[in-house]
């Protein structure tokens, strides 16, 4: 057996570069980008090796370890989990900064490779700079914090370990059911250790995403149940995107007349103009989709984990005889709430169900109802987006304008605060995909970092980032990253002077406004200090402007479109104007009410709970 003597850092990078993936008949590098901030824990060995392969694996410099890992997450999502980004850091705070990004990847089932420096395996220099010492268990380091938010975790303490851990790590990131983030801890002394590796270990390997096939008996049970359904309904989740099953979904519903409602992750799996698209479902959805969910007698949940915002904390399903068929590559997701599970790939399952159902079609009266309810919702969205005069803007007006002005191929992206609900409630999908609401972890700060990663994945089209003032303040430095790297974004900062959506929740549960809106925070008397976001973005190298109202938005957006680098548009948002839908959502309230307003909130909450579906 031929061998090659390499250091751990050399072997690690050489192996990663050798990994390829077949996408639609084309072979591409599996790892399409790397983000790194170097320090004493990774610059001397790993840093040089990344430099040596920068023509094959481009490395971009982030400004914050958390945000660069978020950019890698967004890169993977924009590529439907078929290409992966890397985040490399030093030890200590540089590493733990990535824990939040790992939480995003874990919750959303997205691949992410994190490599962080670690303390010396020999322990001879202990305690080293940035080491967190645990006297009862000296093998614990700060990197153990990643165990709660990763699908695969390992610390490389011997060079030979790479022969086992790297294939397992990559298989985890490519597995459709267990897909998620991987963490590799790299002790500083081990990175430089040499070993005689088999040459064949570094041969190019072409991967493909597995498509688990449905069992015949499960398909037969589903077909039997569907044929008895009077009001069948599909809930389309993010797994439809990842399976690349959007065409199969459209063909299936056209052939069998089954309407579709979409989760947040499943938004834009269908065009809005499709007459069988009932709109977004759940607490941040549409009255049309929630009405259909309440009436359905058979629900086919495809590629969704049925999160509480999707199900209205399991209150939207009002038919006591409802049966759920769950198509999911993850068995735990497939069996939720006593569902009839089909543990399989969405695309393959839809193709097989279509054949087995033959010429069966759902009742036209049910389909007509879907079209009528969806039309009412679309009219409501249009009325929310209408601009009258020069009043302070609302979220819905900004979203309506972006929806109208965005071009084919553009990606729209947001994450936390009031924007995810507003975008989900009001967006009208004119193209399949190109839509990212990070609402699994709902992480403030993902927006601008995610926009940077999405732009790297889609270099030929614009990425439009919608971000609130609160999220902007938490993490904004990738405006500079995008300028430095030449990755143009359009960033729209919606400034409602605080955490207005949480203030709304505070008030809706009977509590007083406190510590959310800037005006309700502890501060000196006198003028309220406000951030000039336009100047701040300009200081990071972006083109920026603040508009006074929505009558100026179209022209500002056109200037941002024409610009050759990241452009930021700032608009003040009325913190009292919200879109809404009729859907209950469970929140924690006290058993004892000390005020009349809290007592009323508890009463309203208790009434909504009577519709909550009990299951496992």
Image (cartoon, helix red, strand yellow):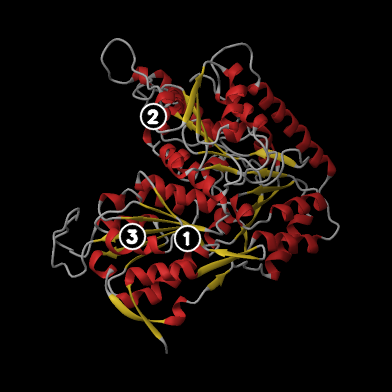
Image location (x, y in percent) of residue 319: 67, 43
Q: Report how far apart the C-alphas of labels 3 and 2 lie in the structure.
A: 29 Å
Which residue position holds label 2?
Answer: 539
Is 161 above or below relative to 525?
A: below
Q: Is residue 155 left or right of residue 562?
A: left
Image location (x, y in percent) of residue 260: 71, 45
- Residue drawn 62% across and 68% down? 212
Q: Secondary structure at mark 3?
A: helix
Q: Are marks 1 and 2 in contact (CB under 8 Å)?
A: no
- Residue drawn 50% across and 55% down? 109
Which residue position holds label 3?
Answer: 47
Q: How many marks?
A: 3
Residue 443 is at least partly visible in this image: no
- Residue drawn 42% across and 90% down? 1
Task: Rate crowding at label 3 as few (under 14), some (14 to 19) or many (20 or more) other CA atoms within 10 Å.
Answer: many
Which residue position holds label 1?
Answer: 55
Residue 32 is at least partly visible in this image: yes
**Camera-side mark, 1 or 2:** 1
Q: Report how far apart the C-alphas of labels 1 and 2 lie in the structure.
A: 31 Å
Q: Quadrant of residue 194?
A: bottom left
Q: Nearer the viewer, residue 375 or 556?
A: 556
- Of the numbered discs 3 and 2, the one sitting upstream in the chain is 3
Is 502 above or below relative to 528?
A: below
**Camera-side mark, 1 or 3:** 1
Q: Is residue 546 left or right of residue 260?
A: left
Image location (x, y in percent) of residue 321: 67, 48
Q: Secondary structure at mark 2?
A: helix
């Amino acid at each position: 057996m031929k061998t090659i003597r390499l250091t751990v850092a050399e072997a690690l990078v050489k192996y990663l570069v050798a990994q390829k993936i077949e996408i639609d008949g084309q072979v591409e590098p599996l790892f399409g980008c790397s983000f790194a901030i170097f320090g004493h824990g990774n610059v001397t060995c790993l840093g040089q090796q990344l430099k040596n392969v920068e023509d094959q694996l481009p490395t971009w410099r982030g400004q914050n370890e958390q945000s660069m890992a978020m950019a890698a997450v967004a890169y993977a999502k924009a590529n439907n989990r078929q290409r992966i980004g890397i985040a490399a850091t030093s030890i200590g705070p540089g590493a733990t900064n990535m824990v939040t990004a790992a939480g995003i990847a874990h919750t959303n089932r997205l691949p992410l490779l994190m490599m962080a420096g670690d303390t010396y395996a020999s322990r001879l220099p202990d305690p080293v700079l940035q080491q967190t010492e645990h006297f009862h268990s000296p093998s614990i380091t700060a990197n153990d914090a990643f165990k709660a938010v990763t699908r695969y975790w390992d610390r490389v303490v011997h060079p030979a370990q790479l022969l086992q851990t790297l294939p397992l790590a990559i298989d985890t990131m490519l597995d459709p059911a267990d897909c998620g983030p991987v963490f590799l801890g790299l002790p500083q002394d081990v990175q430089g250790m040499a070993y005689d590796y088999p040459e064949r270990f570094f041969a190019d390997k072409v991967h493909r995403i597995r498509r688990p096939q449905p069992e015949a008996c499960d398909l037969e049970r589903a077909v039997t149940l569907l044929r008895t359904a009077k009001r069948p309904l599909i809930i389309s989740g993010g797994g439809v995107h990842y399976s690349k099953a959007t065409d199969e979904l459209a063909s299936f519903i056209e052939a069998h007349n089954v309407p579709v409602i979409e989760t947040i992750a499943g938004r834009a799996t269908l065009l809005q103009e499709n007459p069988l698209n009932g709109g977004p479902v759940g607490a941040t959805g549409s009255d049309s989709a929630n009405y259909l969910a309440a009436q359905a007698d058979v629900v086919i949940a495809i590629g969704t984990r049925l999160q509480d915002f999707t199900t209205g904390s399991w209150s939207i399903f009002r038919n006591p005889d409802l049966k759920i068929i769950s198509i999911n590559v993850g068995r735990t997701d497939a069996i939720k709430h006593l569902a009839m599970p089909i543990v399989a790939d969405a695309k393959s399952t839809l193709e097989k169900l279509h054949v087995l159902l033959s010429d069966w079609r759902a009742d036209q009266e049910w389909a007509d109802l879907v079209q009528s309810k969806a039309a009412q919702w679309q009219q409501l969205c249009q009325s929310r987006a209408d601009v009258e005069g020069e009043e302070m803007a609302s979220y819905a007006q900004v979203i309506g304008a972006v929806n109208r002005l965005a071009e084919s191929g553009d990606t729209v992206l947001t994450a936390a605060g009031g924007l995810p609900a507003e975008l989900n409630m009001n967006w009208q999908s004119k193209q399949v995909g190109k839509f990212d609401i990070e609402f699994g972890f709902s992480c403030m700060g993902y927006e601008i970092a995610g926009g940077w990663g999405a732009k790297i994945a889609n270099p030929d089209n614009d990425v439009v980032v919608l971000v609130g003032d609160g999220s902007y303040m938490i993490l904004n430095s990738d405006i500079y990253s995008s300028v430095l790297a030449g990755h143009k974004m359009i960033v729209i900062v919606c400034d409602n002077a605080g955490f207005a959506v949480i203030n709304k929740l505070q008030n809706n549960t009977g509590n007083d406004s406190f510590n959310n809106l800037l005006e309700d925070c502890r501060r000196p008397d006198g003028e309220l200090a406000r951030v000039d976001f336009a100047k701040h973005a300009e200081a990071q190298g972006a083109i920026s402007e603040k508009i006074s109202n929505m009558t100026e938005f179209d022209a500002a957006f056109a200037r941002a479109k024409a610009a050759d680098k990241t452009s930021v548009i700032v608009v003040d948002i009325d913190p009292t104007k919200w879109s809404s839908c009729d859907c209950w959502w469970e929140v924690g309230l006290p058993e004892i009410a000390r005020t009349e307003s809290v007592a009323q909130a508890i009463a309203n909450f208790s009434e909504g709970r009577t519709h909550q579906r009990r299951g496992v």
